[in-house]
Amino acid sequence: MAGHEDSTHGEEAAQLLPLPTDQQQASRRASEDSLSSASTTSLVFERIGERVEAAEDGHNHNGNGKGLNGHGNMVTPKFPPRGESMTYADDEHASGSYEEEEKEEDDLESGPFLTKGVTGKTVDKKLRRLIWVVGGIFVGAWVVALILFLARQSYRHSSEIPHDPTATSTRGSGKQITLDQVMGGAWRANKQGISWIEGANGEDGLLLEQGVAGKDYLVVEDIRGSKDKEGNAAAMATKTLMKQSSFEYNGNRLTPSRVFPSKNLKKVLLATGVQSNWRHSFYAKYFIFDVETQTVDALDPANPDGRIQLASWSPQSDAVVFTRDNNLFLRKLSSKTVTQITTDGGPDLFYGVPDWVYEEEVFAGNSATWWAEDGKYVAFLRTNESEVPEYPIQYFLSRPSGIIPDPGLENYPEVREIKYPKAGAPNPTVDLQFYDVAKGDIFEVKVSGGFPPDDLLITEVIWAGATGKAIIRETNRESDILRVVLIDVELRTGKTVRNFDVSEFDGGWFEVSQNTRYVPADPANGRPYDGYIDTVINNNYDHLGYFTPIDNPVPVLLTSGNWEVASAPSAVDLKKNLVYFVSTKASSIQRQVYSVKLDGTDLQALTDDTTEGYYGVSFSSGAGYALINYDGPNIPWQKVINTPSNPDHYEDIIEENSALADMAKKHELPIKIYSTVNVDGFDLNVVERRPPHFSEKKKYPVLFQLYGGPVSQTVNKQFSVDFQSYAAANLGYIVVTVDGRGTGFIGRKARTIIRGNLGYYEAHDQIETAKIWAAKKYVDASRIAIWGWSYGGFMTLKTLEQDAGETFQYGMAVAPVTDWRFYDSVYTERYMHTPQHNPGGYDNSTISNMTALSQNVRFLVMHGIADDNVHMQSTLTLLDRLDLAGVENYDVHVFPDSDHGIYFHNANRIVYDKLSNWLINAFNGEWLRTANAVPLQIDAASKRRDVKISNL
């Protein structure tokens, strides 16, 4: 490769030839070395044995003791001078005698090993001792080598040795990772999905199984089987909900795409004909399936073909609330008549479902409807988008609406207008409303001291059990002032129970979460008051706080320390007052599962936190069982266990990924080296992926890969074989990822420093880390590139801009934000404030220095034209700036009809093919000459072409 020394190039090229594998060569060398040492030692003792035999023969057959010295000791025959023949000791015609040798007592190796004329007893004794010592050393070395050979299992082929994620070198030789494998999902671990459900009578440990071979289509299974560990019929028997995977309605055979059993397990809500809308939302036709009769009825018998956006069971299993055409409806099972709750829903007004920005950035789901536990009330969001500007998305090849254009209009692209609030633009306004099921009326509870409608985000709604109270989390538009409101729907009153301005506290912001957990009062069990568990800030880290009574603004601190909780709480055991959560207590790049009591004592690890691990977990409805997902660093596995909440031991491994483990044995995976770098006083996590058979004597190109978005994490201990692995293991490059400031789980000080100035500190951290790597003796500092997607695409361009070719020479940005004024308001303003409040920060974060970009050798930009998330506007605006500045050292690839994931018509494969080939060409030096190009002379061009052909 260009830039390498000739010897290095030769070594790398040799790796591509079908020569004997390194392990075969190493095994052969080990065999030869051990044979050599064994042979030398054997020769010494063989000579000794021969002479002993000769001495015995001399005693028995030669009266004068011929062959022995005067003392009866064995002697060694001398080699004659060069050119003379030598008489052998067993030659009966030999004319020589052993008189000279008799003078050299105990001289076992004189003659052939010592120079002529060196004699004497002193020398002979020393030589004998030396030979014994040398022989002993050879034997000892041989034994040690044998022990190491056996201990390291060097006799086994590398394909028989399990994958070792902690290995710092590659042993043996295996197959290469291919891009086809990565793209085809061959390296993706299998995961068994368990849908925990609560039994009709509160039974714990029940799971929903759908489409399992050898069973009915939809069944409820007790995780313990039909009997407990003592053989007693303690577990619930398997209950079939649906026998067949399809059903008939009005003469049509339909297959459900999604199933939602009622809590009493007597009915199942079925969604058919699912059509995707945005990332989480979809349209479908819904039916109610009766378990006992195995028959079906339309959710709305009067309109069975209506496209329904959302449907959900009441906790009492006696009603379904649903949204259709942005209006809310109620179907009670006691009647086939549907009650319409709202009537003014339409293109600008949503009931019970989120609009685009709330779905994407707030709820991360398709629902804005919440049933009260007693089924008496339904809370729902009313979203008004009338003031939100529209953004057009063009589809040139497909028609997502499903509408066939009139003749003559089929050659025009379909345009979908999205209500998309960009930073600083009007947001949708939201109101939380309630529906009284018994009275049939809608009402709203206003609480004084709230945010103005244009400065309000409602981020979470939690019913306080069956108390008739609801907990509402609200923030201002810039997400730095939190307000928790308690509403009593029976009295139709409310009050603010908690206010917190985090911008004044540490300059940060509140992340949106859906993890707040209500804890009901139980005086007999040590809980005299209602309360809730929420994430709180404690000494620079996110921890768990228990607020009780429910209107108490000061929490009981459940966790503390220089680590953070993640996705917490995961479950609460109300019988034993235990809270389960996932955290970084063991390491910021690990995830372990823990439990703690509601008084903040007795913190215990549920997973083995003495061993590196990255775990996920899902709990049964009563927290007595847990599905443990081990995601790395070794081969992922899954098992179901009992928790401390359940004294009955249970453990069942449900997925071992044995095929993946076997595949990992047979392939050469990159060597992962984890470390930290200190930049400006902050310790940042880094992972370096080295090629197999890495050698510090070589000079490697380096690819930096990043995402880098606020509170994200890319460096972790998960098992992963991805594009980065392919670049390291197949292409032979070093691939580095550093989680810079702004990313998650290393403390709020490192996180909040980026606020109001996205891109600056993050790019600085990438550059400083790249300088550290550029100084390493095995790195070719003239070939360093960086790439990322989405926020990572923005960071790629921002890093190239800030570096201006000093450290990085190449970059590849996919679907990048280039100006934060173009991105959605809820996400952007959380980290940047509004453009009206922070115009200078938006200017600084924009990719605007085209002169700096021109200092890089070359960069690549790719984008989907139908990207509804990061609009194509970002890339087009960047291209215009480049044009105006006369900068041409870049390549562009756009993908028609592809959204942010870039999948339409084979586009995703093209993205990664492009990344791979473009990077190879970059590191091969193909992009070095771009400006003021001069054509080669015809003869020179021909010679160059001939050289290329000869090298193929």
Image: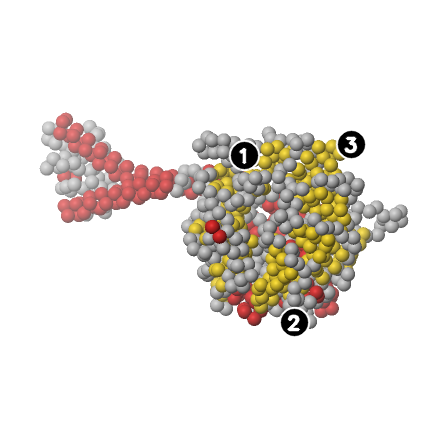
State which tag comes first along the sequence, 1 or 3: 1
Foreground residue among 192 and 169: 192
| Disc 1: which residue | 236
Query: Can you give x and y, in whole percent of width and height, for residue 590 in the image?
Result: 49, 53
* Number of other residues with Cα within 10 Å of mark 2, as a class: few under 14, some 14 to 19, many 20 or more: some
Residue at left offset 68%, top offset 63%: 446
Crowd rating for badge 3 (residues with CA inside 10 Å; few <14, some 14–19, many 20+): few
- Residue type at numbered disc 3: Gly
Label located before the other in sequence (3 or 2) = 3
**Cα distance in 3D space between marks 1 and 3:** 36 Å
Specify whether 358 is left or right of 601: right
Label annotation for residue 721: none
Q: Quadrant of residue 561?
A: bottom left
Of residues 397 and 619, the one drawn nearer to the viewer in this rendering = 619
- Please tell me which residue is depicted at 77% across the width and 61% down the height of the picture: 386
Residue 509 seen in this snapshot: no
The residue indicated by pointer 2 is: 838
Q: Where, by quadrant of the figure, is residue 891 drawn?
A: bottom right
Quadrant (top left/top right/bottom left/bottom right) for the N terminus: bottom right
Disc 1 is placed on an element classified as loop
